[in-house]
Amino acid sequence: MKNTLKIIFSLILIIILLVFCGVFIVIISFASWLHTYRVFTAKTLVAEIQVSELKTDENGYEYFDLTYRPKKQQSGLLTILTSNRPGIDEYDESASYTLYGDHFEVGGEIVKFDDFWLLLNLENIYKVTRLEGDYTDVKKANIAAEQGHRSLYELNGGTDEYWKRLQRNEGDYEFLVDSIYGNFATKFVQNEAKSYNLYITEDGFILD
């Protein structure tokens, strides 16, 4: 009888242990999935952009006004070495531009780390370097460029030698980097003023 009770008690303990192990595995798996989902769907605010309605000058060329208000960013090195981030409401001084075209592009350079490093909370490094207005109609775009209606502005000093050197020597960082490339987000200008947020995501720059 005592042996039977010991066996039953041992079986109950084993079942309880297995249940706890199963629950622990489920929790760990869910936490891992949640972390992976957060990493690969996260988006970080880069700038606020305000765009006027589409206008037409006396020569029939469409143009619009755009105000670019970048969020304060810390250097790429500090991004890697620290977890400190500028406050959510901290912005640099805004700048206004007049752009010819019916749409605009904004973006720059990105260092995309391998997924392994992203899962360890290493964030992709980026630099917004260019703002451009252009026409959808290629013929009109070429004529406008010939007549001086080419709208292209450097932001943050443009693509400097540091970024060019990184891209030229991308193979030297294979253990760490998935790709080093340029990426741009585009929006058509409407017949009314619009506001957009520029974000950096796992897939590059997006306008939302």
Image: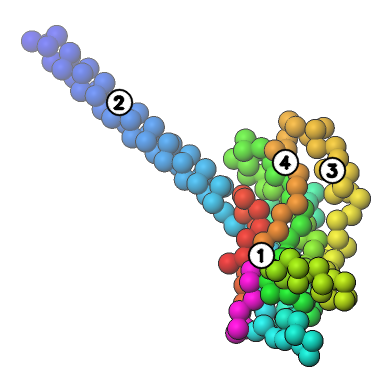
Q: Is residue 59 left or right of residue 54?
A: right
Pointer 2 or 4: first along the chain: 2
Residue 21 x, y percent position in the rendering: 35, 28
Between discs 3 and 2, the one toward the N terminus? 2
Q: The residue tagged with tag 2: helix, strand or loop?
A: helix
Question: Is 190 in the magenta?
Answer: yes
Q: Amino acid at mark 2?
A: Leu
Q: Give the amino acid type for the residue marked by disc 1 in the picture.
A: Thr
Q: CA distance from mark 3 to mark 2?
A: 53 Å
Label 3 belongs to which residue?
Answer: 166
Q: For the view shown, which residue lies furthest in the right direction?
A: 161
Q: Return the mark for residue 186.
A: 1
Q: Is residue 159 magenta?
A: no
Which secondary structure, mark 3? helix
Q: Is residue 15 above or below residue 116?
A: above
- The magenta segment is 187-194
Q: Position of residue 75 (x, y in %)?
A: 80, 55
Q: Earlier in the sequence, mark 3 or mark 1?
A: 3
Per the image, the residue denoted by label 2 is 17
Give the quadrant of residue 180: top right
Q: Residue at x 82, y 32 (%)?
A: 172
Q: Amino acid at mark 3?
A: Leu
Q: Nearer the viewer, mark 3 or mark 1?
A: 1
Residue 171 seen in the figure: yes
- Of the two numbered discs 1 and 2 on the same chain, state the one appearing first in sequence: 2
Quadrant that contains the N terminus: top left
Judge whether 17 appears above or below 40 on screen: above
Going from N to C along the chain, the mark reached first, 1 or 4, is 4
**Circle 3 residues within 10 Å: few <14, some 14–19, many ≥20:** some
